Amino acid sequence: MGTDMALRQEPIAAVPPKQRSGRIPPIEVALSALSEYDAAGTSPFVSAGPLDSLPLPVSGMKPQRFDAQFAAILDLAAKLCTKTDAGSLLIMLEGPTDWEKLRDKAGDLQVVVAADTAEELAGADEAGLSTIVLNMADSPVIERLTQALLTGVAREVLAPGARLVVVYSGFEVDTIDSVSYIELDEHLGRLTARDLRQLETSVPLETLKTVIDLAVEIGREGREGKPIGTMFVVGDTRKVIQHCQPAGFDPVRGYNRAERDLHDPRVREAIKEIAVLDGAFVISAEGFVEKAAQLVDAPYANLTLSKGLGARHWAGAAISKATSALAIVISQSSGTVRLFQSGEVMLRIEPLRQAMKWKDFDYEPPVEAE
């Protein structure tokens, strides 16, 4: 489902960045959600301009100046939208800016702004801008950018087949210096809310999205650099438990409901830690982890799966056939997430690749003539 994306960086107008200790090398990213991505370089304008019109920042949050360089980058992005028939402009920010000026500068374009926290986007909605909160402050720029695109599609802010231009900080921290044109593939490898609503299930949409997002994170990140596979069985809890038996120690046994609520980020992080254990997680429709490390024993009769799928996938198909539950299975070998319903694969999600490892800038000083 979906196609791979090749990412290429080709400077349009580049100047040596200030205090630059490294560079972004040519990168290739395998990602099912995007088709083709071309990045541009920096602008020659010098930062300047008052901060009087900016919202008061939260402590530790640096506002984005609406200066000559930022304005020039926005003009370049708007022209690129016109040349490519792109209808949306995505702006990756690291702090608040003058939202009204931004809205006026973009004209009739749909403007989507993304940042790591809701505080950094305060006031953007009131100015008529769509917002995306990333919560990925320590992640590489490529992962933040792709996550913004995928979240935009999942929330139906961006259309699956949209053409858009992205403005972001690609070379120097806290400096908007790059413009990219992106075409989103019509068949994304990421779930949209519409996909989930089409599933005839009693599991609330919010619970299903929470579990799937967690599964995608596990498939992408693994644990401590090692890939892991696991399974979540969501809904029809009483009947599911009748087909389960402990694989050993149940790490969630004895905890109260609040300490087993998947809507709590701390609980999701704890689940990532114990996902390395054998067995499945049993999740209630309300999003509580009822049991962990469970061996699923359901009849395999009348099931047909693709070649190459192992015992975990067969168990997921079987339990979804024997009950009204949904089984979400993460492949240890590839990180692919599959959602089973009534014994069949209904959705397949190819998560983002592993985080990139950045290399220091190689520089050899010139040899002085004797």
Image: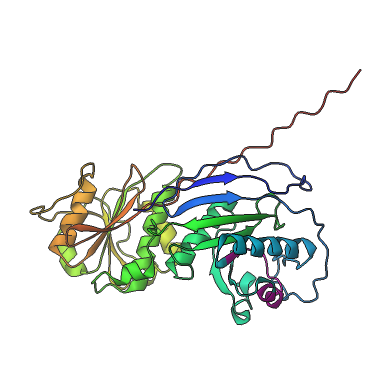
Q: Residue furthest left?
A: 301
> Is residue 93 within the magenta segment?
yes
Q: How many marks?
A: 0
The front one of 271 and 155 is 155
On the rendered structure, is 201 left or right of 69? left
Q: Residue furthest top?
A: 370
What colouring style does the render use?
Answer: rainbow
On the rendered structure, is 37 left or right of 229? right
Occupied quadrant, residue 207: bottom left
In the figure, 283 relative to 107: above or below?
above
Q: Position of residue 70 (x, y in %)?
A: 73, 63
Q: Which residues are magenta?
A: 89-104
Q: Position of residue 283 (x, y in %)?
A: 28, 65
Occupied quadrant, residue 154: bottom left
Residue 134 appears anywhere in the view = yes
Residue 273 appears anywhere in the view = no
| Picture quarter with the C terminus | top right
Occupied quadrant, residue 164: bottom right
Q: Residue furthest front?
A: 83
The front one of 370 and 271 is 370
Query: What residue is rendered at 69% in x and 76% in y?
Result: 104
The front one of 294 and 12 is 12
> Is residue 258 within the magenta segment?
no
Q: Residue furthest bottom?
A: 126
Q: Position of residue 43 (x, y in %)?
A: 75, 54
On the rendered structure, is 351 left or right of 204? right
Query: What residue is rendered at 50% in x and 57% in y?
Result: 183
Q: Position of residue 2 (x, y in %)?
A: 37, 53
